[in-house]
Image (spheres, grey):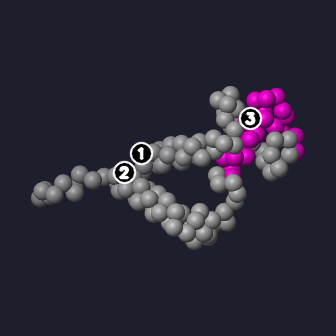
Amino acid sequence: MSSSSGLSRIGSGTIVALGIAGTAVALLALGRVVGWDETWRTFGVTPLQPPFFDMHVINDYAACAWKGVDAYAPHACNVDNFNIPPTWLLVGFLGVDGSDSWWLSVAVFAAAMIVGARTSP
């Protein structure tokens, strides 16, 4: 028996994509209403400053490494001492620094969600 409404053609990837989009809209709205720190605390996550802190550290180290600074010396590029894989340090070639963290974080997240949606059964 076929459905005339067309709902039978909606696949799991579409459902996942709609769920992600809905969650993103809800988080953006909640972030605007109560603020980003309070939004993250709602989900039990301690917010770090600046926003996209982990990508800031990667980008700071990549920019320093590209300028010739030893990125593996303690506190050479950022007050936080992380061991960044050499592959991530190559993004310094693109001229990125801490100010590019938001869009690079969104790009990495979007790529992960696309791969996740494409590989789901």
Residue 64's disc number: none
Q: Is residue 33 visible?
A: yes
Q: Position of residue 111 (x, y in %)?
A: 50, 43
- Which residue type does callout 2 highlight? Gly
Residue 13's disc number: 2
Residue 63's disc number: 3
N-terminal of the pair, mark 3 or mark 2, is: 2
Q: Residue furthest right?
A: 74
Q: Which one is nearer the viewer's eye here, 83 or 36?
A: 36
Q: Tell me where the magenta segment starts and ends, as one range.
A: 53-74
Q: Which one is nearer the viewer's eye here, 41 or 31?
A: 31
Compared with 23, 14 (above or below) is above
N-terminal of the pair, mark 1 or mark 3, is: 3
Element type where label 1 sits in the image: helix
Residue 118's disc number: 1
Q: Is residue 22 left or right of residue 91?
A: left
Q: Is residue 14 left or right of residue 89?
A: left
Q: Mark 2 near mark 1, Cβ–Cβ under 8 Å?
A: yes
- Which residue type does callout 1 highlight? Arg
Taking the spot 23% from the left edge, 51% from the top edge, the residue there is: 9
Instruction: Determine if the magenta segment contains residue 58.
Output: yes
